[in-house]
């Protein structure tokens, strides 16, 4: 492979050192050496109320989990990620000492770098048609596709968008759980904000922005510190892999905005659920928002499924979470559809394929255990799933050029899928049903098993069933098991 540190030569290993010139060795060492680390600026306490709020929401909505299932050496988070990669990061814009200020968030080290303040921040907000709510914050999600693509190849870009959808959607839910109606924006000009946050030059892409109004902040922000990083001359050299730069260059044009008109943010479900397919009795959607923090804090991904049947009512209660409204600027109509394959319940009469948009029930032969394993790229641990939710769109909706003026682009469709996936996770938690999401699957086979139209593409699959947490979640390992890598 061109560009590797060492290029294989057609000579015996014993002779390689004899034929290697001193210059070659020096060049090799220059490539593997690291620059010196710059001194760390002095740490300051977090003073801005909006930043405190944003950090406490990030802790609750993304970074920490109180789930009591064993995770081994894996640190549990409030949201799932393909391969436990988490290919995104955050920036926060808040008012500090009366001045609008931008902060880069280092979630691993629990530090915030103040990168810009005053007029440049105001100008970027104006150009982006965004603002910082009084006493609140603007939380920007930035994707770093390389983290996922280095494991999953090109498909890792889709996983990046799905993972970011889980995180951004959960931030809105976490804010609502505190009585603050956060609004998520996807349709806004990104150039000025990207320049302010130095996103493109660091191989990052602005995914979305969540406007969080003033609300109480818990004490989780107290573990964070702030340091000043506004003087670029004092930062020193930044290490960056040429592999990431090459990956970034390969994405040119992939994520271009659709040019769709900006819309006012309004609360609405991200997927239409026919009234005929909602659970009898009880609350629709995800229920009382005051209960959401507990659901968020105890969410888990199932490692496997036992194969035992589960209650159809519990599955429907979990699925009803898809009708929970979120405040976004996406259009109310969407090409995204959801299909539920209910294959192993304690009420066999309910086992069938359901079109959730129309309420249509399609009886017939349901997938066998072996077929589920094949359709999930031979992930045998998932073969015992009692139900599978498929999120799919007509292939024409992915066409790009020539699409309708207000058509959603891949980022927006993937956000819907990721946020809906997070709602299903929380709904399953509420209904005491195991759940896991996968991005690696055999689309033609699932299309056949679920009777989907031939021109539909499946963007996401989520499986529900009786959880078996005795093993390990294989796709957290280095190998891309979700894509049947051997």
Image (spheres, helix red, strand yellow):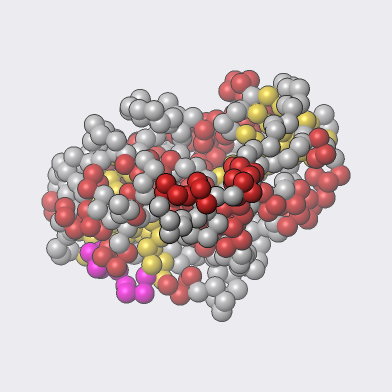
Q: Residue at x 70, y 33 (%)?
A: 36
Q: How many marks?
A: 0
Compared across the picture, whether 145 is left or right of 394 comes to right
Q: Residue at x 35, y 27 (%)?
A: 72
Compared across the picture, whether 213 is left or right of 178 comes to right
Quick one: 257 or 38, which is closer to the camera? 38
* Residue 193 can be seen in this image: no
Outermost residue to the bottom:
402
Residue 83: give x, y in percent of width and height. Answer: 41, 44
Quick one: 438 or 363, which is closer to the camera? 438
Compared across the picture, whether 56 is left or right of 313 comes to right
Residue 482: give x, y in percent of width and height. Answer: 34, 51
Task: Give the magenta range.
Answer: 448-456
Residue 332: give x, y in percent of width and height. Answer: 52, 61
Q: Is residue 455 magenta?
A: yes
Residue 415: give x, y in percent of width and height. Answer: 51, 54
Q: Residue at x 40, y 31 (%)?
A: 74
Compared across the picture, whether 374 is left or right of 49 comes to left
Q: Residue at x 80, y 44 (%)?
A: 121
Q: Is residue 236 magenta?
A: no
Quick one: 200 or 353, which is closer to the camera? 200
Quick one: 427 or 40, which is closer to the camera? 40
Q: Quadrant of residue 233?
A: top right
* Residue 28 can be seen in this image: yes
């Amino acid at each position: 492979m061109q560009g590797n540190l060492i290029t294989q030569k057609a000579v015996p290993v014993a002779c390689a050192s004899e034929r290697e010139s001193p210059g070659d060795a020096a060049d090799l060492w220059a490539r593997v050496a690291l620059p010196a680390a710059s001194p760390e600026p002095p740490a300051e306490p977090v003073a801005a109320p909006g930043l405190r709020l944003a950090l406490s929401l990030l802790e609750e909505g993304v970074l920490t989990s109180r789930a009591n299932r064993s995770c081994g050496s894996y640190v549990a988070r409030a949201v799932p990620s393909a391969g436990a990669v988490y290919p995104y990061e955050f920036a926060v814009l808040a008012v500090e000492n009366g001045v609008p200020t931008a902060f880069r968030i280092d979630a691993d080290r629990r530090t915030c770098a103040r990168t810009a303040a005053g007029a440049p921040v105001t100008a970027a907000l104006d150009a982006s048609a965004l603002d910082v709510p009084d006493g609140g914050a603007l939380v920007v999600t930035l994707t770093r596709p390389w983290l996922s693509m280095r494991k999953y190849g090109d498909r890792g870009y889709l996983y990046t968008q799905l993972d970011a959808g889980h995180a951004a959607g959960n931030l809105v839910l976490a804010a609502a759980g505190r009585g603050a109606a956060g609004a998520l924006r996807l349709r806004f000009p990104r150039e000025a904000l990207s320049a302010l946050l130095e996103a493109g030059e660091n191989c990052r892409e602005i995914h979305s922005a969540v406007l969080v109004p003033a609300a109480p902040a818990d004490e989780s922000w107290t573990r964070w510190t702030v340091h000043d990083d506004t003087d670029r001359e004092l930062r020193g050299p930044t290490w960056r892999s040429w592999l990431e730069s090459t990956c970034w260059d390969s994405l040119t044009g992939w994520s271009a905005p659709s040019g769709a008109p900006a819309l006012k943010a309004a609360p609405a479900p991200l997927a239409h659920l026919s009234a005929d397919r909602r659970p009898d009795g009880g609350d629709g959607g995800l229920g009382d928002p005051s209960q959401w923090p507990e659901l968020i804090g105890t969410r888990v991904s199932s490692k496997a499924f036992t194969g035992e049947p589960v209650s159809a009512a519990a599955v429907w209660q979990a699925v009803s979470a898809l009708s929970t409204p979120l405040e976004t600027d996406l259009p109310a109509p969407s090409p995204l559809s959801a299909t539920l394959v209910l294959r192993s319940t304690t009420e066999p009469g309910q086992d069938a394929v359901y079109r959730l948009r129309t309420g249509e029930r399609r009886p017939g032969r349901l997938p066998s255990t072996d077929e589920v394993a094949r359709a999930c790229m031979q992930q045998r641990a998932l073969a015992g799933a009692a139900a599978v939710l498929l999120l799919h769109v007509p292939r024409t909706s992915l066409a790009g050029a020539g699409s309708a003026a207000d058509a959603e682009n891949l980022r927006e469709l993937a956000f819907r899928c990721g946020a809906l996936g997070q709602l299903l996770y929380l709904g399953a938690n509420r209904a005491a049903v195991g759940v896991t999401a996968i991005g690696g699957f055999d689309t033609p086979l699932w299309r056949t098993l679920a009777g989907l139209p031939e021109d539909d593409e499946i963007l996401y699959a989520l499986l529900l069933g009786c959880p078996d947490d005795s093993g390990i979640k294989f796709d957290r390992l280095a190998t891309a098991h979700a894509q049947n890598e051997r």
